[in-house]
Image: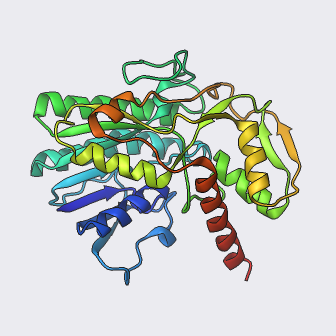
Amino acid sequence: MKILVTGGAGFLGSHLCARLLERGHEVIILDNFLTGDKRNLPDPNGGGSYRLVESDVTEPFDIRVDAIFHLASPASPAGYVEHPLETALANSVGTYNALTVAEKYRAKFLMASTSEVYGDPLEHPQREEYWGNANPVGMRSCYEEGKRFAETLTTVFERSHGLDARIVRIFNCYGPHSDPNDGRMVPNFVKQALEGDPITVYGSGEHTRSLCYVSDLVEGLLKAMFTEGTRGRIYNLGSQDEHKVIEYASTIRRLAGSKSPILHVDPKFDDDPKRRRPDISRARLELGWAPVVEMEEGLRNTIEWFRALMSNENR
C-alpha cells in the first residue's frame, strides 16, 4: 500500500514509518520539522521505499495514497506551550486537509488523538464513552481542544462523507527517538538521571501515569487501521500499569545507576491530570491488542538509547 504519515519525523511517527517499511509498504512522510527531527527519519540504506515531503500540514496538499495516519501536531507540553497557534491549526486546518485528501482518494484514515481529550478525568479508568473534564481556555487547551475538534471533523467525514476513518486516543507513550528537551516525564527524568542533575518532580509526585512502550503503541495503531470492522470506532491505546510519578523517578534513577537527588518543584499547570489510566477493553476485544513490553524493560531500552545519544552529542 501507499501510505502517508503526517508528522512522520516525530517520536511516534518515526517508529510507525519504520514498521510500515518493514511490512513492505511505500511510505510518504509529511513533516515541517517544527517538533520533528530529521535524525528520526528512516535509514535510507535500511530497505523500503519512502519519500519525504517537507511541508506544513496546514497548507493544502494533494498526494494519492491508500491510507493516511494523521499524527502531525506538537504533542509534548513544551512543544504546544511554545507553539500554541501551530498546535491548534495542525489539529483543525491540518486535520481538515488530511481528511479531504483521504476523501478524494477513498483512502483509509486514522486520526491520532490523545488521552488529553479527557482533561483532568473524573472517571477512572477512562472509557471511550467518557466525555471528559477538559478546560477549554487553559494552557493545554490548544492541544486538548485541538484534538477534540479533530475528532469531531473525523467523525463528520466518516458519517456524512462515508470515509473509512477511525480514531485512537493515545495515552502516555515513551521510548527511543524521544526529544530530550520536550518536557515530558520520561525524557526529563532519564536525561537528568544520566547527567547527575536533580530529577525534578512536579508537585508531590503522588499523581499517576500509565506508560506504554512505543513498539506496543505502534502495533496498536496498525491494528486499529487494518483490522476489519474498525471504521467509525474509537480506541484507547495505552498501558493499564499505573504508577505514581515519584515511583517512575525512583525506578529511572535506579536503572540508570544514578545518584541524582529527587527534587520537588511547583507544578507547571493547574489543570495537570491527577490520574491517567485507560480502559483498553475495547482494543483487547476488537483488535486483539494489549501492551506486552514490561515497564523496566522499556525503561532500560530508553535509558540506553538516551545514553548513546548524549554520548554522541558530547564527542
Q: Residue at x 60, y 42 (%)?
A: 77
State the image coordinates of residue 172 (x, y, percent, origin top left).
54, 41
Tally of numbered tags = 0
Residue 46 lies in quadrant: bottom left
**Rendered view: 128 above or below 51:** above
State the image coordinates of residue 141 (x, y, percent, origin top left).
52, 30
State the image coordinates of residue 42 (x, y, percent, origin top left).
40, 72
Q: Residue at x 47, y 48 (%)?
A: 292
Q: Depth check: 233 or 265 in front?
A: 233
Q: Depth check: 247 or 76 in front?
A: 247
Q: Is residue 97 visible?
A: no
**Rendered view: 99 above or below 13:** above
Q: Residue at x 65, y 66 (%)?
A: 304
Residue 25 lies in quadrant: bottom left
Residue 149 lies in quadrant: top left
Q: Is residue 269 left or right of residue 49?
A: right
Task: Please identify the residue farthest to the top as the structure is shown.
Answer: 122
State the image coordinates of residue 34 (x, y, percent, origin top left).
49, 58
Q: Depth check: 260 or 135 in front?
A: 260
Q: Depth check: 148 or 122 in front?
A: 122
**Rendered view: 313 above or below 61:** below
Q: Is residue 294 left or right of residue 38?
A: right
Q: Is residue 237 left or right of residue 177?
A: left
